[in-house]
């Protein structure tokens, strides 16, 4: 439980740093880029699994 508290503390400090020092726009741009990358990876993975004939893992 203490580990989760430390993780959220670090996340809050990073978010505060980005918000206070004007890097929020940069963080939003990085988040959009990562979203696109992971959606592309999801689609490629789904197609490769469908071509192999494997059922999707649940």
Image: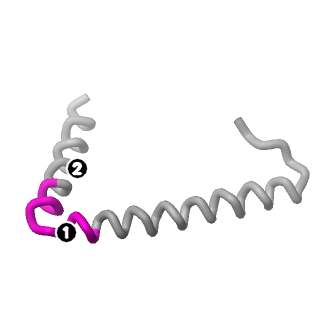
Q: 10 Å neighbourhood of mark 2: few (<14), some, or many (≥20)?
A: few
Q: Position of residue 11 (x, y in %)?
A: 22, 50
Q: In this picture, which residue range is highlighted in magenta? A: 16-26
Apparent side of residue 26 relative to residue 38 in the rendered image (left or right): left
Would you say residue 19 sits in the magenta stretch?
Answer: yes
Q: Position of residue 39 (x, y in %)?
A: 59, 59
Query: Which marked residue is nearer to the observer: mark 2 or mark 1?
Result: 1
User: Quadrant location of residue 16?
Assistant: bottom left
| Residue at the right extreme, as displayed | 53
Q: Position of residue 52 (x, y in %)?
A: 88, 57
Q: Residue at x 18, y 48 (%)?
A: 12
Q: How many marks?
A: 2
Q: Residue at x 27, y 36 (%)?
A: 4
**Residue marked by disc 2:** 11
Vertical relation: 56 (above or below) 33: above
| Residue at the left extreme, as displayed | 20
User: Quadrant location of residue 43?
Assistant: bottom right
Q: Residue at x 9, y 61 (%)?
A: 20
- Of the two numbered discs 2 and 1 on the same chain, state the one appearing first in sequence: 2
How much space separates mark 2 and mark 1, taking CA atoms? 15 Å
Vertical relation: 13 (above or below) 3: below
Magenta stretch, overall SS: helix
Vertical relation: 22 (above or below) 14: below
User: Quadrant location of residue 26?
Assistant: bottom left
Image colouring: one colour
| Residue at the top extreme, as displayed | 1
Residue 23's label in the rendered image is 1
Q: Secondary structure at mark 2?
A: helix
State the quadrant of the N terminus.
top left
Would you say residue 1 sits in the magenta stretch?
Answer: no
Apparent side of residue 38 relative to residue 13 in the rendered image (left or right): right
């Amino acid at each position: 439980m203490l580990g989760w508290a430390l993780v959220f503390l670090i996340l809050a400090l990073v978010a505060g740093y980005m918000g206070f020092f004007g890097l929020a726009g940069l963080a939003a741009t990085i988040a959009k880029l990562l979203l696109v990358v992971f959606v592309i990876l999801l689609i490629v993975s789904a197609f490769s699994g469908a071509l192999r004939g494997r059922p999707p893992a649940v």
